[in-house]
Amino acid sequence: MSWRERLGHWLFTTLLLVVAVMLAFLSTRFAWQHDFSYAQRASLDADTVALLHQLDAPVAITSYAPRDNELRGAIADVIARYQRLKPDISLTFVDPDADPAATREAGILINGELIIRYKGRSEQLKILTERELDNSLLRLSRARERLVAFLSGDGERKPDGQANADLGQFSALLKAQGVRAMALTLDAGMHIPENVDLLAIAGPRARIAPEITKQLLDYVERGGNLLWLIEPGEDADLEPLAKALSLRVLAGVAVDASAAAFGIGDPSFVAVSTYPQSIITRDFSLTTLFPQAAALAAVADPQWQLTPLLRTSAKSWTETGPIPKQGDTTTISYDASKGEIPGPLDLGFALTRLSPSPAKREQRVAVIGDGDFLSNSFLGNGGNREFGQRVFDWLLQDDALIQIADKGTPDRQLTLGQGALGVIGFGFLIALPTLLLIAGAVIWWRRRRA
């Protein structure tokens, strides 16, 4: 090789290295990416992108996940998609094993649970999906504070109370998301304030005066949104309200023999893991726990569109007799002669109709046969908190909450008929071995001739 050829070779190598270095440097300044996955599963939805552009302050996310855990990597991958569009989203990991005190103080129950903070508000997230994270961010970015009034004065659960049966913890959760809960005591001649976004009735223990019942009926007739948490055997003289809502409360306590599969020894504790189709329960997979629940039924010719929210299994019934306490060896069983009704039973309904108020398009009511699931004692069980949040989001008509279907992997499952399976079996078991045998024979014959 001449000196000119060597010089050309070294010049080419030098230029190639310079170009590589320049490309590496430019890659640190400019980014380009493209999603080649099926149905763009690795990219954020257009609604998510629009939401991130609306957030005008930093978002801080804290994840409680152990060290050296694949869970951290999975969480970081999801958040990284958001950080590429909004760089001021920060992600911090806390090891629950290394700092158990901070974990308990934050109310963390499962590994990987997240706390999201935005503009002084915060929300906890157990399941990290694009839809759940988007809904959390949108709740935290509420521009106007919502007002929820809890009826008070007749032994109802207190929205700011710290007793086991009160709703103080859930009200604190609502406050962190831009919803203010307040107690409302109605006297004769009073009206429910017009600025109330939602009225809640949470298990009154005394009979409600007819004048107050009339106020409740008037509120519903004017198009107000309502949440009614009923308790078994409740005697609050609210039958006119139930009639106006096209519902009736069944006698007895809902019991479910299948609850034993969840390790629950008390038959009056109903665990729900599968839900009827509704906008509230769509894609909801957490198990909810309802202690001492009342079953509900729709009346004929309802004035509302009723959608079941919670339904027990076929092994349930309405027990009208005494419920044995935990540890008691007494057994109970379905008895039709006592008027008990077999399951499946409905424990909750979502009601909608065209709003009588010209300022609203749709009137919404939710009636659930239990208030314990939101109480301080049971709020942290399973998905109680998340289910309650969904109910309130719907009742507050937060239709802006993004309902993005989680991007699954539809190309992972292949369904074949018997004919296709037969062709594949014939190909792999007979045709392919035969071809290999023939090819081997031909190669042997040619080599022998050579």
Image (cartoon, rainbow, N blue to C red):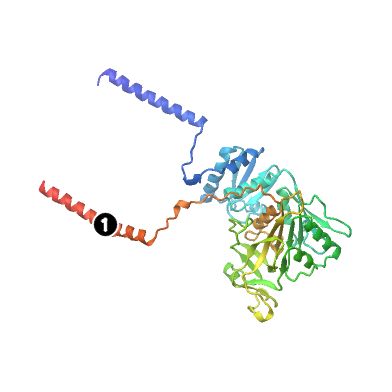
Q: Reply above or below: 295 against 335.
A: above
**Residue 40 left/right relative to 296:** left
| Residue farthest toward the top in the current orientation of the protein | 4
Residue 299 horizontal/vertical position (percent): 70, 68
| Residue farthest toward the left in the current orientation of the protein | 449
Judge by depth and name the residue closer to the eye, 136 or 240. Answer: 240
> Residue sitting at 73 percent across and 52 percent down?
172
> Residue sitting at 49 percent across and 37 percent down?
33
Q: Reply above or below: 271 against 129.
A: below
Residue 177 horizontal/vertical position (percent): 70, 48
Q: Reply above or below: 120 against 173.
A: above
**Residue 20 left/right relative to 324:** left
User: Can the viewer see residue 266 in this picture?
Assistant: no
**Residue 149 left/right relative to 12:** right
Residue 97 horizontal/vertical position (percent): 58, 53
Q: Reply above or below: 354 against 20.
A: below
Q: Quadrant of residue 273?
A: bottom right
Name the image quarter holding the N terminus. Answer: top left
> Residue sitting at 64 percent across and 52 percent down?
103
Q: Quadrant of residue 413?
A: bottom left
Judge by depth and name the residue closer to the eye, 104 or 253. Answer: 253
Label 1 belongs to which residue?
Answer: 431
User: Can the viewer see residue 394 in this picture?
Assistant: yes
SS at mark 1 in the image: helix
| Residue farthest toward the bottom in the current orientation of the protein | 337
**Residue 165 left/right relative to 112:** right
Q: Amino acid at mark 1?
A: Ala
User: For the image shown, how many numbered marks are present on the structure?
Assistant: 1
Residue 88 horizontal/vertical position (percent): 62, 38
